[in-house]
Image (cartoon, rainbow, N blue to C red):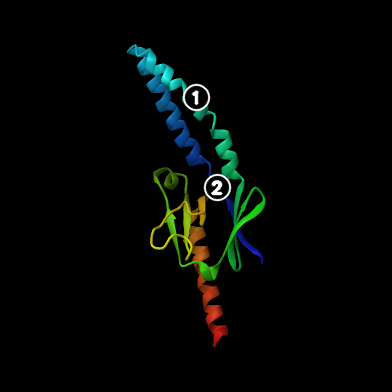
Amino acid sequence: MSVVWSGKSCLKNTVVKFIIVIVFYAMMFIYFRFIGLMWFIDELKLGIPFLSALPIYCFLKRSVTYFITNGSIIIHYLGKKYIEITFDQIKGICLHQGFLARIFNCGSLVFLTPYSGGIFISKYTGHAFFDVYEPEKVRELLMNMIQHDRSFYNSNKR
């Protein structure tokens, strides 16, 4: 199978969300120090390990590569094939885009399959391309390929 498209997750919106959390955390720290709640500052210090998690999270997010081939979608995790879904298993594709994702032109494509939990759409089933760049174009490319695959299958079936 030949690769038609490949991509990785966008980290811009993740980093911006993390910066917002850090700024909020710092503002709380300054505020509680200013009003004299020293015991709460000690509680805030417990969250410092959370702040060091960004590099690890970014590494794990960038270690996933998404592929669209001429017959399936493939998700590689740390260089090994994690999941492959053939076009005949895909019943629909949902696009999830938050506010920051729209600004940075990225979003998640969730693939509805018989194994993805029925009518409930969840982007955490593992059947998704998370935070890919230009998700509308990727979705359109994939929908066209699936339609072509199905029409080719139906014409050969007769």
Whole-percent x, y for residue 28 in the image = 38, 22
Look at the image and tell me in which quarter the N terminus lies.
bottom right
Which residue sits furthest top?
A: 36
Quadrant of the rendered structure where residue 71 is? bottom right
Whole-percent x, y for residue 9 in the image = 55, 47
Residue drawn at (41%, 17%) of the image = 41
Quadrant of the rendered structure where residue 22 is? top left
Q: Is residue 56 left or right of residue 116?
A: right
Q: Single out the mark in the foreground, 1 or 2.
A: 1
Q: Nearer the viewer, residue 102 or 147?
A: 147
Which residue sits furthest bottom?
A: 158
- Asked which secondary structure carries label 2, the reply is loop
Which tag, 1 or 2, sits closer to the chain's start? 2
- Pointer 2 residue: 9
Q: CA distance from mark 1 to mark 2?
A: 26 Å
Q: Nearer the viewer, residue 5 or 94?
A: 94
- Pointer 1 residue: 48
Classify 153 as above or below 41.
below
Residue drawn at (50%, 53%) of the image = 134
Q: Nearer the viewer, residue 60 or 103?
A: 60
Instruction: Give the amino acid at mark 2.
Output: Ser
Crowd tier of the residue under label 1, counting other residues whose Cα lies within 10 Å: few below 14, some 14–19, many 20 or above:
few
- Asked which secondary structure carries label 1, the reply is helix
Asked if the residue at tag 2 contacts the one at tag 1, i.e. Cβ–Cβ closer than 8 Å, the answer is no
